[in-house]
Amino acid sequence: MFSRLAESNAMAQIMYGLALRERSHGWGLPADPPLGISYLSRAASNSAAVEAAALSSGLKKGGAAKGELVLAIYELANSFRHGWGVQKDPVAARSYYETAANLGDTDAMNEVAKCYEDGFGGKKDRSTAAKYYRLAEKNGNKTLGNTW
């Protein structure tokens, strides 16, 4: 079902990509991590195009595809962090987390903060880590021990 929907629907592309990326999300599908990554990438690209059109038409906060865009970017970050369907790439993971965080995803805010705190994907920067931890908390994602 997702494969047919995933031809033109960003959320279906995300769900199908997740289903293919790893067995734990497989929902009865055989795992095909590289194909899963391609669907996640397609979802991010399609959602970004929809958002660009919404912003250019005068919507100040974007349109209906922002959630799909952020989710696709966050899941690509997870893929690069853990090597799911792609080579592990800490620099790419941190960059994708930061992009999703800057688009408002509170889980990504905590993840990029941890990257900065640990020096994952770049230099350690406790000040930037604290900024993202505080931003996540301010936006409702409190994680015990992360409020410095």
Image (cartoon, rainbow, N blue to C red):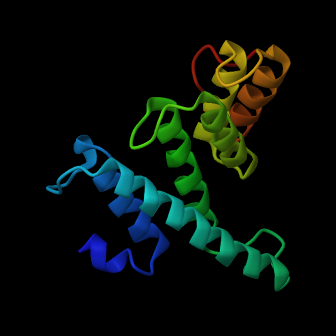
Residue lying furthest left: 28
Seen from the viewer's position, the closer of residues 106 and 56 is 56
Q: Give x and y (percent) for residue 130.
A: 78, 21
Give the residue at x 70% y 73%.
Answer: 51
Residue 93 lies left or right of residue 5; in this view the side is: right
Give the residue at x 64% y 47%.
Answer: 105
| Location of residue 97 with respect to 34 vertically, above or below | above
Residue 31 visible in this rendered orientation of the protein: yes
Residue 130 lies left or right of residue 115; in this view the side is: right
Residue 144 lies left or right of residue 54; in this view the side is: left
Residue 140 visible in this rendered orientation of the protein: no
Locate the C terminus by quadrant: top right
Residue lying furthest bottom: 57
Q: Give x and y (percent) for residue 74.
A: 56, 46
Seen from the viewer's position, the closer of residues 71 and 76 is 76
Q: Say which quarter of the image contains residue 86.
A: top left
Q: Say which quarter of the image contains residue 14.
A: bottom left
Give the residue at x 52% y 47%.
Answer: 76
Q: Give x and y (percent) for residue 94.
A: 66, 33
Total numbered labels: 0
| Location of residue 38 with respect to 74 vertically, above or below | below
Locate the N terminus by quadrant: bottom left
Q: Give x and y (percent) for residue 92.
A: 63, 38
| Location of residue 34 with respect to 53 vertically, above or below | above
Residue lying furthest front: 87
Give the residue at x 51% y 66%.
Answer: 42
